[in-house]
Amino acid sequence: MIGLSHYMALSAIVFCIGVYGMLTRRNAVAVLMSVELMFNSVNIALVACARFVTPETVTGQAVAVFTIAVAAAEATVALAIVLLIYQHHRGIDVDRVNFMKW
Amino acid sequence: MISGILSWMIFIPLIGMAVTMLLPKDNHRLIRWTSVIVTLIPLGLSLLLLKAYDSSTAAFQFQELASWIPALNVNYHLGVDGLSVPMVFLTALLSFVGVLVSFNIEKRVKEYFAFYLLLVSGMMGVFAALDFFLFYVFWEIMLVPMYFLIGIWGGPRKEYAAIKFFLYTLFGSIFMLVAILALYFTSTPNSLSMVEHIQRAPELTRGFQLFAFSFFFIAFAIKIPTLPFHTWLPDAHVEAPTAVSVLLAGILLKMGTYGLLRISFPMFPEATRYFALPVAILGVAGIIYGAFVCMAQTDLKKLVAYSSVSHMGYCLLGMGAVGSVAAISGAMFQMVSHGLITGALFALVGVIYDRAHTREISAFGGMWIKVPVYSGIMVLFVLGSLGLPGLSGFISEFMVFLGAFPYFNVTVAIGVVGVLLTAAYFLRMIQKMFLGPVAGHTEGLSEINAREIIAVLPLGILMIAIGVYPALLSDYIQATITNLVRLIGA
Amino acid sequence: MLANAWLIPVLPLVAMALIMLVTHRNRTLSAGISITAMAIAFVWAWAIAFTVWGNPVEQRFHFEWLNLGPSMHIPIGIQIDGLSAMMLIVVTTVALMVQIYSLGYMHGDPRYSRYYAYLSLFGMAMLTLVLADNFFLMFVAWELVGLASYLLIGFWFEKQSASDAGKKAFITTRLGDLGFIIGLLMLYAGAGTLTFEGVFGAVEKGLLGGAFLTTAAIFLFGGAIGKSAQVPLHVWLPDAMEGPTPVSALIHAATMVVAGVYLVARGLTLFMAAETAAITVAWIGIITSFMAATIGLVQNDIKRVLAYSTVSQLGYMVMALGLGGFTASTFHLMTHAFFKSLLFLGAGSVIHAVHTNDIREMGGLHSKMKITSTTFLIASLAIAGIFPLSGFWSKDEIVAATSGHPVFMILTLGVAFMTAFYMFRLYFLTFTGTPRDKHKFDHAHESPKVMTYPLIFLAFLSVVSGWIGLPWLHHGFSSVVYHGEPHHAEFHISLALISTLVALSGIGLAYLMYYKRSIDPVKVGGAMPGLYRTLLNKYYVDEAYAVLFIKPYYVFCQAMFWFDANVVDGIVNGTGQFGLLWGRFQRWFDETFVDGAVNGLGWVTRGFGATIRYLQTGSLQNYAFIVFAALVILWILR
């Protein structure tokens, strides 16, 4: 029987993949994708907890929906920025985006 | 009678200043004539004032009283008595004369006349104010245009002279401010009204009177100026443009003596009696010392400036005789007479400076041959200055001597020597500049023009009129000075 | 006529104003106005004289001029009595003659109109002076005549010597005026009024007296010393000869210089009440008289001889007043005015003809200028005191006034001798003998009629004016001009004889030396070289004054100016400089310590920041790694 702990494990694995990707990828789009992964791991955890801990309400699911919306918004803005950076720098290597550094 | 005539006289120049600033910058003619008109109106009003003034009483007349800053009990209080009426008239007259002799200012004309009119407004205010706060405001406000008028339109050392004048006068004002505050806080309810302070004079303790008198005296002594505070005067005069010299000598110096008569004497009668002899001695020292220094001058304007130090000494000598109506009237006569004569002398010095661009006495000679009209006018005023009978200077000197002699006979006798020394330095100047063969810069001089004659003409007429019939002036001041002597109670 | 007498001085005043303001371009009209005004005054004065002298009454007219209550009350007004009537006559007569004479003398002068304006100014002032009924108005007029004198002495001001002389005259007389002013102040302080009536009343009532009155009188006399050129202020009068000669005749011989005598005469009550003052007056008078006469002996400038003669005669008058000889003095004042102005005008006529003042370049002019020569001779006889000319009568009274004072009498007679001598020395050298300068002699000519007629008129007066004081006529001169009660002038036949003898011997000596040439003047001078040189240089008084007073005064004034510019102003500037230095110090302190503390804090912060800034890589991934690392560490440390 698949229980809460399985979901939690999945969520943790996906989160770690996301973190790893975010910290190591140089490609901004890949970094963004990693961030999306971390969002989604959180969504898994939220929905799972809601289903197993408080089945009578749908609070967790509702929050997950919010998170998806925020993630979409965030992705839009972030992609726009990335696009501009690309136009500016002819590249989206995050290590080279240092023009705001002191 | 126009209501608020004093306010009009103070504020018309101020309005004129605003109007001047709105005029086109390059239309010099328009600016000059606007200023002429703006100074002519107060002159006309001052004539009305003289006509309407009731000389039989010592009370303040044409009073205007309005609350200004109720929280501090500050009032907008104007009024004139026998001390201020002649000074208000003199101010109006000399302001008009000053505009006429300013016609050849070519540099930043608009600003010049704006500052000038502000100065006129301030001077009027000092003589009309009956509230300490107002008095102080006007007193200080004059410094600003004065500073710029000397500092911008002055001679080679204008910055030095302007700063010296400004700081020196301000230094004195601080003492005055302290004394005013002392008066304010010792009175209950706290009052800044001169009239009230005159009334409460007998309640003041001796110590307080001595303190307040001394503090006021420092401020006034610098303005007069008396020995040893006089050294700003030659510098300021020599560097100042002609019209400013006229007003400086004619009006600003009188504020010192006016302040003594208006404030120090009636408010601190005991201290006045105490300091009578030192004041007289200071006066005589000024007379003699100024005359000595005049003898050594090579610059005509500086000579006239130092002669002011000498002549203001007569005022102080007369004021020293605090119990004598004649002596104090003499001091008052000297204030008016010196304003007329020295004002005209500075205007006339300006006339040759405009033409020859030098004021060195040794640069001229034989002017009487080359420019007889100018020479005749100049010599007439010089004679007035050295106290020739029939001209106003003599009357004032004689009244001072006659009034003060019973009080300090030796001091006065020493002061009389000033009459001789004055003749010596002026005659030396006349000889070098006007007599002898035509020499130096005289060659290129042109005769005095109509505008310049019109400028000094009223001064000359008044000088002769007062000299021949002094009752013209004494009628205005007599009641007030009699009352003043009563207040001093010597 | 009497009531409107105040109009007399107004006439020349109006003339002056008209000339100055209206007619100054028209020479003839200017002169005409001036002369007309004086002519009216002249007629008026004589009319007044006959009225007053007929019945000697004093007339006063007051006018409230300045009234400041009890502390100062000065009415002004005029007073007509015998003395002022006499002075009116003297002034108007001489002034009129001089003005007419000037038509010729000043002919062609570029400042002709101005000359007449000045003469009118003088006339106005002088007439006011003699009419005044109080010391104040008198002083006013006194100063104005001084001004007119200044202007006229320096009339040809292109010449340095003329403008110097004018200045000298003004300042020297003003030195005397200081005494006058102080005297006035004392009188006012003592009597509370300056009218003659009031002051003399106070003296009589004893309000004024003692040492106070003596001091006041001596100070007052100071004015007379200056104006009437008494020792030690006599130095200006000889120099005043730089002015046009008619001016010398009018101002410096007949009218202004006697103002001092007039002042003492007017105030004689004061001097009589103060014995010390009176005796001072007498001594000053006789010393002046003697000293000036000795100088007059050797001068070579025709006008200077006359100038010293004037000083000497003024000394006479002053001395006589000091001795109480009021009538003698005023009588001599009048006769002297006529004959001395005649002498000056005569000298002017000569100068006009030969264009030099030096008598050594003249000689033999009688043949060319008969009228001038004759009138000059009459005046010389008059001043020498020869019967029956005017000088005889007045000098006789003066000698009589010294009776009882042997020293004064001897000196007076000595002066009389010298006067006769130098006048005739002058006459002989100028008009007789052979011409010493041929060129100048050839060009000489008699003066025009406008100049000679006044001479003739004055010569007439020089002869007859003494007869008014004929001793056997009623009271003599004292019946018209007197002090106190008219006293009977006694004719001292012995005194008259002695003084005539003295005068004649003076004339005789001059005759021998300068006409007959039986005594060589050069030898006489050579016999006493020291004395001669001293006299020629006027006792070196001018030089002494220059060294003792004038130059030190200049130096002193320069020193005072240095003191003012460097010490007094130095203190002011020093204060300013100190303020500036203090400000600089403040700034240094501020920058070093106050600002240092603030900056120090900044530096510390900055250093710290510089160290830890290396943490800020700007790489988002580094930051994120730190965040997670920290989280992990925190989780482990939990």
Image (tube, coloured by chain):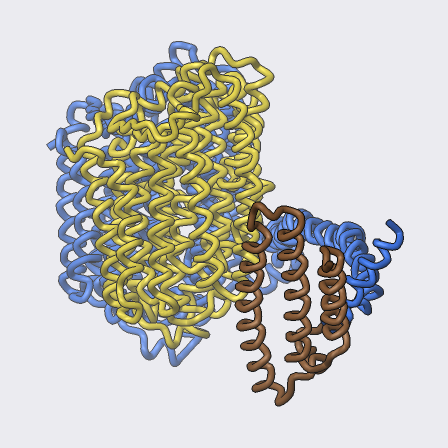
Instruction: Provide residue C621's location: percent of width, then percent of height.
Output: 74, 72
Instruction: Provide residue B415's location: percent of width, then percent of height.
Output: 52, 35
Most extreme residue toward the right is C637
Which residue is drawn at the image coordinates 26% and 20% (left, top)? B57
Q: Depth check: C533 or B478 in front?
A: B478
Instruction: Provide residue B123's location: percent of width, then percent of height.
Output: 37, 43
Left or right of B305 on screen, residue B355: left
Q: Colour of chain A?
A: brown
Looking at the image, residue A25 lies above or below residue B209: below
Left or right of B217 on screen, residue B44: left
Left or right of B21 on screen, residue C496: right
Q: Would residue C5 be visible to someone looking at this image? A: yes
Most extreme residue toward the left is C1
* Quarter of the image with the N terminus of chain C in it: top left
Most extreme residue toward the bottom is A90
| Chain letter, blue in picture | C
Which residue is drawn at the image coordinates 33% and 63% (left, top)? B110
Instruction: Provide residue C281's location: percent of width, then percent of height.
Output: 49, 31
Looking at the image, residue C202 lies above or below residue C529: above
Q: Depth check: B404 or B459 in front?
A: B459
Q: Colour of chain B?
A: yellow
Q: Depth check: C345 or A85 in front?
A: A85
Looking at the image, residue C265 lies above or below residue C508: above
Which residue is drawn at the image coordinates 78% and 70% (left, top)? C622
Most extreme residue toward the front is A1
